[in-house]
Amino acid sequence: MAFSKRSIFRESAIQKYLRRQEQGVLLRVISPPAFLLLWIVVVFFLGAIGLTWLVELPISLTGQGIIMEQNQQGDSKIVAALFFSPDQQGQLHRGQPVNLNVGSTANGLTGSIASVETQKISPEEARQRFNLQGALVQVVTGPSIVAFVDIKSASSTRIYVGSVCAAQVRIGSQRVLSLLPGFNQFLKG
């Protein structure tokens, strides 16, 4: 019996079969609703990153001080003498906003830095210069830089003269994104 070299398949059918084999087969890994949900999650994640890029948190220095009355040329005004460590002197500048909390109450006073002294003072020097006695002695425990704050006047401000206050001086702000590990280096460089 003689075998013929003719194929039982048509030439066009073979070509069509070979072309189909060359085409990539796309697998359907996830269903369309899951794919849509995945895109929604990605958009939400990118929106959250964008929001953390835009939102800024204030950076502040904290210090303690006393509220006192300052007499200048027959005019008296209420100021706060705040004590900061000497290494914070470069961050304190005239005009920076200050929030003051007097004693253990939530009474808040506001003002701005009027001046920052350049010379360090010792605790003993601070006690003599500002007449610190009793509980006020504990305000200054080491060498300090003094910053004077003009307190925005209110009718009840005079009752706080001689009181200890805690201060927060706003020195700047930082993006929320910089608080996440690794992003701080990305934002600086």
Image (spheres, rainbow, N blue to C red):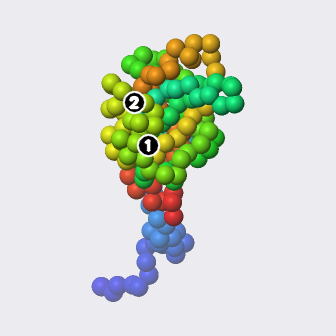
Secondary structure under the numbered disc 1 in the rendered image: strand
Distance between mark 2 and mark 1 Cα atoms? 16 Å
Question: Who's the residue at 36% across and 27% down the image?
Answer: 133
Residue 7, located in which quarter of the rendered image? bottom left
The residue to which callout 1 is attached is 84
> Can see residue 52?
no
Q: Position of residue 39 (x, y in %)?
A: 51, 43
Left or right relative to 185: residue 172: right
Question: Who's the residue at 49% across and 67% down the image?
Answer: 23
The residue to which callout 2 is attached is 132
Question: Who's the residue at 34% across and 44% down the image?
Answer: 142
Secondary structure under the numbered disc 2 in the rendered image: loop
Q: Is residue 115 above or below residue 154?
A: below
Q: Is residue 120 above or below residue 159?
A: below
> Can see residue 143?
yes
Q: Is residue 28 above or below residue 7?
A: above
Q: Nearer the viewer, residue 119 or 115?
A: 119
Left or right relative to 155: residue 28: left
What is the crowding at mark 2: few (fewer than 14 residues within 10 Å), some, or many (at least 20)? some
Q: Nearer the viewer, residue 159 or 133?
A: 133
Q: Position of residue 179 (x, y in %)?
A: 43, 47
Three-letter code, disc 1: Phe
Q: Residue lying farthest left?
A: 1
Q: Position of residue 16 (x, y in %)?
A: 52, 68
Q: Position of residue 130 (x, y in %)?
A: 46, 33
